[in-house]
Amino acid sequence: MPMTMARTSLLVTAMLVGHFAVAEGERISFVACPVVRDTATVPCFLADNAGTTYYLGIQQDIGADWFPPQLNHKVLVEGYLSGDTVCGGLEIKPIATSVLPTVDPACNTILPAEPGIVAPHAERGAGPNGEVPGSAPRRAPPPPPEPPFAVKEFSLSFTFDDDGLIAREFGVLARAIEYAKVSKASAIDIVISRGSAKLSSGEVINEDPSAVMRRERLIRRWLAVAELPTATRVSIKPMGEPLPADGRTDENNRYIKLTITPEKR
Amino acid sequence: MARAVMAAALTLPAALSAQQSERIDDWWSPGQGTPLPERANYSNAGGMLGVFNQAGVLETKGHAFFEPLGSNGRACVSCHQPSDGMSISVATVQRRWQATAGRDPIFAEVDGANCPNQPRGEASSHSLLLERGLFRIGLPWPPRDANGAVIEPEYDLELVSDPVHCNSDSEYGITSATPTVSVYRRPRPVANFKYFAYPRGPGLGFNIKDGTPLDRDPETGYPSTMNIMADAREPTLKQQAINAGLGHLQTQGRLSEAQLKQITDFEAQVYVAQAYNEFAGSFETPSAPDSLGPVAVANGVPGLGDNLHNPVFGFYESWKREDFDGSADGADEFKASVARGSDVFFLRQFWLKDTTHINSIGLGNPLKRTCATCHNARMTGMDLAPGWVDLGTTNYPTWNGPRTFTEDSPLPVFKLTCKPGYKTHPYLGTVVYTHDPGRALISGRCVDIGAITMQQMRGLAARAPYFANGSAKSIAEIVDYYDRRFNIGYSEQERQDLINFLSVL
């Protein structure tokens, strides 16, 4: 493992950030207040759990794959330990974080920048954007769907208890709507999940039923403006009971799935 | 050196106050019928505002923007005065009150009074307009969608205090036969629209901040930029004109298509920006920064600003002076101050915290960035995404007036309680006290409580006071507001440089 100022060995890390060592690849899942660590560049987002400090990620931009948590809210952290230390915390990578909806004023810690604590490189820094002129480069749109059409599934993912559709999911929904139009869908069957999460402590937390209701409202708003073929039958099935948590892939179980059945020829 | 600049700039408003008080001739009366020049300057506290009609001299006789079209004698121009950056300053309002003994059509009961039930001609009936430049905006309660269908609000709304006696009124209030919530807002400038009210093409139109569909242009079905109104309630300039006619002008029916075309054509080609400063001279010389003055605004290219390559308000290198030896004159010092102010705007980092629709959209809370992070649209400094945010100007605790709802305020105070099962305000929680629920009065959503669409930053010197509720009396108060709100800690020089920068936009 290469040594940099931002990354040190796991052994050293264990001494620095907590009182017990954890193994690379180990699953970790917990709820805690996020902690912001200022640096000379962008801030790092950390969280403490059971005496250990974890590194969640850095401030980025709205087009990023990962969104930072928020002070004034607890964060649900789910992922796997990479074995590295970043910005003074054990890195969790891959990682999924969810801003929990309840306002919690106790989550309000900003640590000052300290010598030796360096944030990873940020494509979009805290100051002017010196590396990407203008807005983020647009990805070329995928080619329009072509026959023969088959039953196809599209999945929109959400964070725990949330109904906000983030930028990277826009393309999924756009492709689903386009596929339904081009294939003259006879049916769109929509399943709205209610997820859950098994924490490292063994506790299981379930999404509030209202998250399902809010996701349903979102997809209905889109169906109202999608200009789908008039013959398309739409069914929406919101889940009442939460999907079981397995403590390994729970972050994948918060979704809206659209199954599109093309017109029969 | 910097102290000299500061002192010079601080004396400017006083030096021009006499000149400003003589501006009565700048008033544009409905139906006066004189041509609006292609290019005109109007004096103000910061120097002069420039107004540029890109289509050339405009004959206003018979023009729908300039003629009184309704029963109260107002025209669009009444509250969108060229001299006032196509808005109207509270100083102008006060001058009209003095000049007409309160009979000017801008004081029409419908919205120029605190409530239509109050006696016209008494200053107390128009206190919010006279003191803060605020017009009454009466919105249906509960909210309605574009088709008139009721939107079930995610919150309960209670009136906590009503110092101007409208929301509690039996005829005009929340429990009247036509339930109405009255809020009080400044008129937004009618200019520079190509940067934030442009027609979007076909497409689904995602609101990048939360993934909801953007509102649609009812004629084309295309998504809207949703940046025209303080609460984004009108998707297009045409829709705004239709409803402004019925509401503000009290037309008997919808304006004709020809009238609407005249209005929107005019609005699409008029540009305003400061054009002159006593110390810096004209902004429209080859050596001046390339984004100053209304012609530069007209010639600019819309889009997202990029601080290093294509800054929102251009480059100020030509005004930078690193080698002052104490002999520099006031012009050089002022220009250098403006250039430093530009750097403060674009480069000075601070913690943006607890701001709905900025921190809550995936950027993280807090966010370490600069003014230009949110003020990102070229030439106007608006938010190119739908720009309604809860900056803290309307919800309690406010940073611009009483900190709690129990203190005296000239504005009504509402208590909004989010119903179970809905996302609450992300930083204030389930119960929010506010004097303007903002976007939430249109969307019905708790997350929108207190969210007001960002205002453009051109021609500021011509149209005080600022913020939708007129709570900042001067550009200095805008800067001080942000300093308090985000605990920025500007130095005295940074503060003055930023004030000078904003005064030339």
Image (spheres, coloured by chain):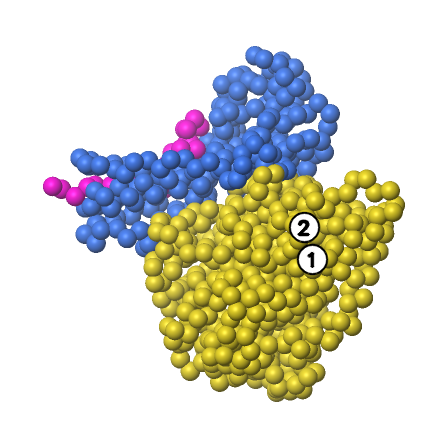
Chain colours: A blue, B yellow
Q: Is the residue marked by circle 1 packed among few (<14), some (14-19), or many (20+) residues within 10 Å?
A: some
Side (left or right) of A96 relative to B124:
left
Residue drawn at x 73%, y 25% as measured from the top left: A115
The residue wearing badge 2 is B288
The percent position of residue B312, horizontal first and vertical second, equals: 59, 47
Q: Which mark is residue B282?
A: 1
Left or right for A80, reference A150: right
Res. B451 in view: no
Establish if B477 lies above or below A193: below
Vertical side of B423 occupied by B181: above or below: below
Instruction: Say which residue appears at 63% left-offset and 17% top-offset.
Output: A4
| Marks 2,1: beta carbons within 8 A | yes
Please tell me whether the stretch drawn in magenta is mainly helix, strand or loop: loop
Q: Reply above or below: B166 against B283.
A: below
Crowding near the residue tagged with mark 2, few <14, some 14–19, many ≥20 C-alpha atoms within 10 Å: some
Helix, strand or loop at label 2? It is loop
Is A179 situated above or below A65? below
Output the chain of dot 1: B
Q: Which residues are magenta?
A: A241-265
- What chain does mark 2 sit on? B
Residue in front for this viewpoint, A227 or B321: B321
Q: Which mark is residue A82?
A: none
Q: Is residue B209 highlighted in magenta?
A: no
- Measuring from the top left, give residue A230's x and y in whole percent: 21, 54
In depth, the one of B311 and A211 nearer the eye is B311
Residue A226 locus on image (x, y percent): 31, 51
| Quarter containing the C terminus of chain A | top left
Q: Please report whichever mark, 2 or 1, sits nearer to the chain's N-terminal start.
A: 1
Amino acid type, callout 2: Ala
Amino acid found under the numbered disc labelled 1:
Ser
Query: What secondary structure is marked by label 1?
Result: strand
Where residue A38 sits: x, y (%)?
68, 33
